[in-house]
C-alpha cells in the first residue's frame, strides 16, 4: 500500500505543536529546539511556524536571544511584507529588547531610537489597524519611550482603552489594560478599584489563565501592599499549574523578598528545581541554584 503524502505545512505544524508541548509540559528547551528546527526544515517559508518559533525564543531563558528572535521576524517580513501580525510582533520585540537593555542602555532613549520605534508602529498601523494588541503595545511605547510617564499619560490610556473596546472578550487585553492603568496612576489609591475591576473582568473571561492571577498578585504586592491577597493568588496559581517550575520560582521569590519566610521560600525553590530539566547548561536551573544559595547564606534578595 503506497505511503500517504503529508503536506509539508502539516508536517511543520505537527513538529511545532510537539515542540510547544515539550516546552509547556516538560520545560525541555533542548528537545523543543530540535523539533522547531525540523519544522522549519519541512516548510521554511511557513510564516506561522516562524512566528511561533520567534515567540518561543523570546520567552526562553537563552542568553543573547534577541538577535535570534529578530532574525525570525525579519525573515517573516521578507516572506510576507504585508502581514500586519508580523509587523505588530516585530514592534513588540523592540519594546522587549528595550526593557532588557539589549537595544538600548538605560531609560532615556535618544531621538534616533524613538524615531525607529515610531516608524515600526507606523508600519504596523498602516497594515494591521484592526489588531487590538497593536494598540495595547503602542500604549506601552507611549508610556515608556515617548515618556508620557513624566506627564499626563493621555495617549497611553487612549491606546490601552481602545484595545479592549476592539476586543472586549479578550481576557489578556483586560489584564494588560489593568497593568497600564496601574503604571499610569501609580500609587493613586482612588484608582485601585478600577484597576482591580479590570483584573477581575479578565479572570471572569478566562479563569484558567494562570498569568492573570500572577499579574493581579503583582498589583497586590507593589500597589495595594496586600501580601495576604497576593499569597492567596499565588497559591492558586501553583495549584492550577503544579508542574510549572516558573510559578514555583515566582512564589519562592515572593516568600523570600516580601513575606520573609525563608523556610517556605526554600521549599518552593527546591520544588522548582525538581521540575526543571537536569543539566549544568540550563540557565534557568543555574539561576534558581544561585538564588537558593543566596537565601541559605543570608544574602539579601535582589530586586
Image: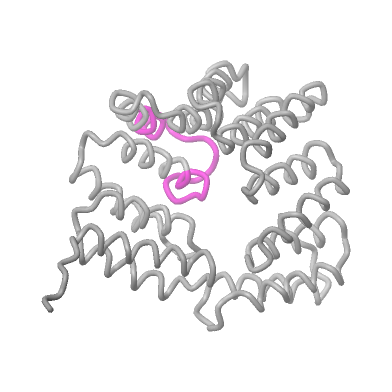
Q: Can residue 145 be seen in this view?
A: no
In the image, taking residue 165 as reference, residue 36 lies left or right, namely left
When asked about the image quadrant of residue 114, the answer is top left
In the rendered image, which quarter contains the C terminus? bottom right
Residue at the image position 18 percent from the left and 45 percent from the top: 79
Q: In this view, does 45 lie above or below 172?
A: below
Outermost left residue:
2
Outermost front residue:
1
2 or 24, nearer to the observer: 2
Q: What stretch is highlighted in magenta?
A: 96-118
Q: Could you say where residue 128 lies in the image, as x and y percent from the top left?
A: 33, 28
Residue at the image position 45 percent from the left and 28 percent from the top: 132
Q: Could you say where residue 294 lies in the image, as x and y percent from the top left?
A: 75, 72
Q: Could you say where residue 233 lies in the image, as x and y percent from the top left?
A: 77, 49
Q: Is residue 107 above or below residue 300?
A: above
Q: Is residue 165 visible?
A: yes
The answer to whether residue 80 is magenta is no
Residue at the image position 79 percent from the left and 26 percent from the top: 193
When asked about the image quadrant of residue 157, the answer is top right
In the image, taking residue 195 as reference, residue 73 lies left or right, namely left
The answer to whether residue 109 is magenta is yes
Q: In this view, does 278 lie above or below 257?
A: below
Q: Could you say where residue 211 lies in the image, as x and y percent from the top left?
A: 63, 49
Residue at the image position 62 percent from the left and 41 percent from the top: 206
Count every numbered label the image shows and give the total: 0
When asked about the image quadrant of residue 32, the answer is bottom left
Color scheme of the displayed model? one colour
Q: Is residue 7 above or below residue 278?
A: above
In the rendered image, which quarter contains the N terminus? bottom left
Outermost bottom residue:
279
Amino acid at each position: 500500500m503506497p505511503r500517504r503524502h503529508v503536506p509539508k505545512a502539516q508536517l511543520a505544524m505537527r513538529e511545532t505543536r510537539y515542540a510547544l508541548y515539550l516546552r509547556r509540559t516538560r520545560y525541555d528547551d533542548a528537545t523543543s529546539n530540535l523539533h522547531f528546527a525540523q519544522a522549519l526544515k519541512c516548510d521554511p517559508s511557513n510564516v506561522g511556524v516562524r512566528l511561533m518559533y520567534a515567540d518561543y525564543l523570546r520567552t526562553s531563558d537563552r542568553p543573547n536571544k534577541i538577535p535570534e528572535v529578530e532574525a525570525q521576524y525579519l525573515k517573516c517580513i521578507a516572506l510576507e511584507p504585508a502581514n500586519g501580525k508580523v509587523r505588530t510582533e516585530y514592534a513588540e520585540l523592540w519594546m522587549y529588547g528595550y526593557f532588557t537593555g539589549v537595544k538600548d542602555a538605560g531609560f532615556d532613549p535618544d531621538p534616533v531610537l524613538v524615531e525607529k520605534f515610531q516608524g515600526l508602529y507606523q508600519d504596523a498601523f498602516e497594515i494591521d489597524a484592526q489588531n487590538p494588541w497593536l494598540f495595547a503595545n503602542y500604549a506601552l511605547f507611549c508610556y515608556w519611550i515617548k515618556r508620557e510617564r513624566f506627564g499626563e499619560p493621555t495617549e497611553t490610556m487612549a491606546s490601552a482603552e481602545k484595545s479592549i473596546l476592539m476586543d472586549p472578550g479578550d481576557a489578556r487585553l483586560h489584564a494588560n489594560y489593568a497593568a497600564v492603568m496601574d503604571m499610569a496612576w501609580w500609587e493613586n489609591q482612588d484608582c485601585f478599584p478600577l484597576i482591580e475591576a479590570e483584573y477581575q473582568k479578565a479572570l471572569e473571561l478566562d479563569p484558567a489563565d494562570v498569568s492573570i492571577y500572577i499579574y493581579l498578585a503583582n498589583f497586590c504586592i507593589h500597589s495595594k501592599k496586600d501580601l495576604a491577597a497576593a499569597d492567596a493568588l499565588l497559591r492558586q496559581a501553583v495549584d492550577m499549574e503544579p508542574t510549572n517550575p516558573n510559578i514555583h520560582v515566582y512564589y519562592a521569590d515572593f516568600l523570600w523578598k516580601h513575606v520573609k519566610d525563608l523556610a517556605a521560600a526554600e521549599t518552593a525553590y527546591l520544588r522548582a528545581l525538581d521540575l526543571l530539566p537536569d543539566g549544568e547548561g540550563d540557565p534557568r536551573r543555574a539561576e534558581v541554584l544561585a538564588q537558593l544559595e543566596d537565601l541559605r547564606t543570608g544574602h539579601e534578595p535582589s530586586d
